Amino acid sequence: MSRKPQAFVLEDGKVESSAKKTSSRTHVEFAPETAHQDLVVVPPADIEARPRRMPWLTILMSAVTTLVMLWAGSAITRMVEEFFARSVVLGWAAMAVAGIAGLAALAIIIREIWGLVRLNKIEGLQELAARAINLDEQTSANALEDGLRGIYGGRADLAWPMKEFAALRGDIIDPRDRVLMADRLVMEPLDEAAHRIIARRARRVTLLTTVTPAAALDILFVASQNFGLLREIAALYGGRPSTLSTLRLARMVITHLAVTGGLALSDSLIQHLVGKGLLGRLSARFGEGAVNGILTSRIGLAAMDVCRPIPARTPAREALGKLLREVVSFSPKDRSDDTRKPEPGNPAEP
């Protein structure tokens, strides 16, 4: 028996409630992925250049250096033979002086090689620290801890931080947390010392640039202060600042500034100061000295980023702002052991 077609009216509330029940049973919501905010980036050491077919300049410099060394050895040998022909005593004296000169040259060569090796080691520790923090790798964290013990194990100023880090090493299982603990215990005291060094050099550049009469002397003085700053920062973080390693460090710092836009950052801060009229109310020479001091501070911060075994997570803008206030005000950094004298009539706080 066939049924006749009929019309049915459904209540909206029942339909919505049934839909909600169905959706609550079948709908699955996924939490949005959040980007990791604590990732660190290794400072760029060099700009990748297009490979050349033949390094002719390197070959030329190597050949010229070899010829100069052969000529010097031949000249010294002839001189010693002439002294022996005149007198045995003079001959042995010339031989002793030549031996001392050769020993000193060998020590200088070893020091230069050791400085480059130590700088490469710090670069490798930065990569290990970045992998341990970003990827939470156990192997990278262990290698980083061994490297830190090799660099800072014999330093008296870091004896207590290294002892505390060694005591807490067994209590922290996560590799990333261990690296961050090393950053807090070992790197932060070095960062404070580095900030004091940069502020002192920047104030010196600002003052002496202001009173120096000639522009050529300004250039020489600023260059010498910046190279001295690089050597102090490198020695503070465990480097061996020889001549070649300092030149390579200067190249790395320039590359770091070019890649990260450090010079533009300094320009923006300078424009900020000039816009507020701070430098405009002062003499032109002091304004020039303040600009040189700011650029010296930026170079020092870039050297910190390059020489630091663990990449820094503090933004460069914040660190440069603190240094800028300290350089322009010519006041040393506040110390925790400073005590304030109570004003007359006000009792001292307990």
Image: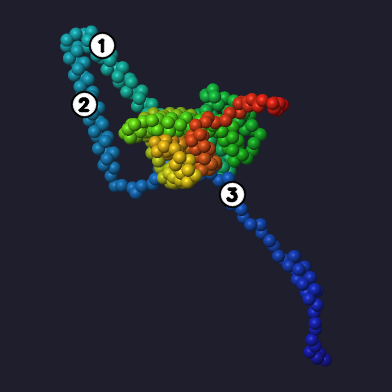
Give the mark, 1 or 2, whose residue is nearer the N terminus. Answer: 2
Find disc 3 in the rendering and name its residue. Answer: 36
Amino acid on which disc 3 is placed: His
* Residue depicted at x 36% and y 31%: 212
Secondary element at tag 3: loop
Task: Identify the mark at residue 267; answer none if there is no mark.
Answer: none
Tell me if 199 is positioned left or right of 217 in this view. right
Q: Quadrant of residue 255?
A: top left
Tell me if 72 is positioned left or right of 152 in this view. left
3 or 1: mark nearer the eye: 3
Q: Say if mark 3 contacts mark 1, CB within 8 Å.
A: no
- Hey, which residue is sitting farthest right in the picture? 1
Task: Identify the mark at residue 93; answer none if there is no mark.
Answer: 1
Give the mark, 3 or 1, whose residue is nearer the N terminus. Answer: 3
- Asked whether the viewer can see residue 50, the reply is yes
* Residue depicted at x 53% and y 35%: 144
Task: Identify the mark at residue 71; answer none if there is no mark.
Answer: 2
Secondary element at tag 1: helix
Mark 1 to mark 2: distance in Å? 21 Å
